Amino acid sequence: EAGVAQSPRYKIIEKRQSVAFWCNPISGHATLYWYQQILGQGPKLLIQFQNNGVVDDSQLPKDRFSAERLKGVDSTLKIQPAKLEDSAVYLCASAQTYNSPLHFGNGTRLTVT
Amino acid sequence: GENVEQHPSTLSVQEGDSAVIKCTYSDSASNYFPWYKQELGKGPQLIIDIRSNVGEKKDQRIAVTLNKTAKHFSLHITETQPEDSAVYFCVNSGGYQKVTFGIGTKLQVIP
């Protein structure tokens, strides 16, 4: 089966600019996650979708971050405006359902200067 | 989900030796305990998982043990090889569908 696809692979922006990341999960996977991974740390959950509904966005900085999963398939994560501390790898993962293995993409490395 | 503590944060072993990584959790509703391996520049990849109705699971050189009473689970890698060098994460999936990663253990296998 094809894996989780993410784009772009790398992105460099200046602070206060906006950026968007795209994720295409494995076909048929109902659950989709966005994680932020700062260098040397474990992934931190930003938002979890079940189909196109939000299950958990308690750690999403909603004043600057937004995410959507239209039609319960692809998802986009947006940051506007970006801050220096947003520099991290943004990982997308999908799973058949809750409590099943997560399949990760290779992430988007964001550098904010 | 909720809190999950993982240790050690770094671990160096000689090739052929065993490595053990431990995690403790707080949510009594937790019932799924996967372990992920992350190599440089890649996303985490599942290497083994266990559910709460099982105490131990093995897959070749990798095993996971679960003690629900004590609320801890461990990853065991035997006969370590250089390609086992990576960062390993325990994950806790508890009530309210929360999925929490540990801080990670950087394992170095010395040839």
Image: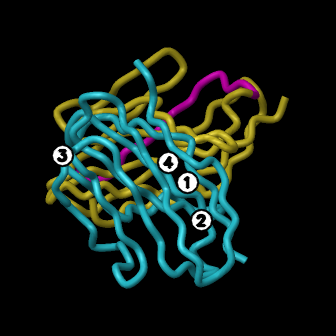
Chain colours: A cyan, B yellow
- The disc labelled 1 sits on which kind of residue? Gly
Q: Secondary structure at mark 4?
A: strand
**In-image side of A61 versus B8 (left or right):** left
Q: Identify whether A9 is placed above or below A16.
A: above
Classify the position of the N terminus of chain A by image quarter: top left
Q: Earlier in the sequence, mark 1 or mark 4?
A: 4
Residue type for callout 2:
Ile
Position in image of residue B62 (x %, y %):
50, 25
The label nearer to you, 1 versus 3, is 3
Same chain letter for marks 1 and 2 = no
What amino acid type is highlighted by mark number 3?
Asn
Q: Which residue is mark 4?
A: B89
Who comes first in sequence, dot 3 or dot 2? 2
Q: Which residue is mark 2?
A: A38
Q: Chain of mark 2?
A: A
Q: Are marks 1 and 2 in contact (CB under 8 Å)?
A: no
Q: Position of residue A80 (x, y in %)?
A: 48, 77
Give the position of the C terminus of chain A as an image quadrant.
bottom right
- Report the Cα–Cα distance between label 3 and label 4: 26 Å
Quarter of the view holding residue B95:
bottom left
Crowding around mark 1 (Cα neighbors within 10 Å: few <14, some 14 to 19, many 20+) is many
What segment carries the magenta color? B69-82
Q: Nearer the viewer, mark 3 or mark 4?
A: 3
| Image side of residue A98 versus residue A41, left or right | left
Q: CA distance from mark 1 to mark 3?
A: 29 Å
Residue topped by disc 1: B104
Q: Position of residue B99 (x, y in %)?
A: 30, 54
Same chain? Circles 3 and 4: no
Q: Residue at x 40, y 33 (%)?
A: B64
Q: Position of residue A43 (x, y in %)?
A: 48, 58
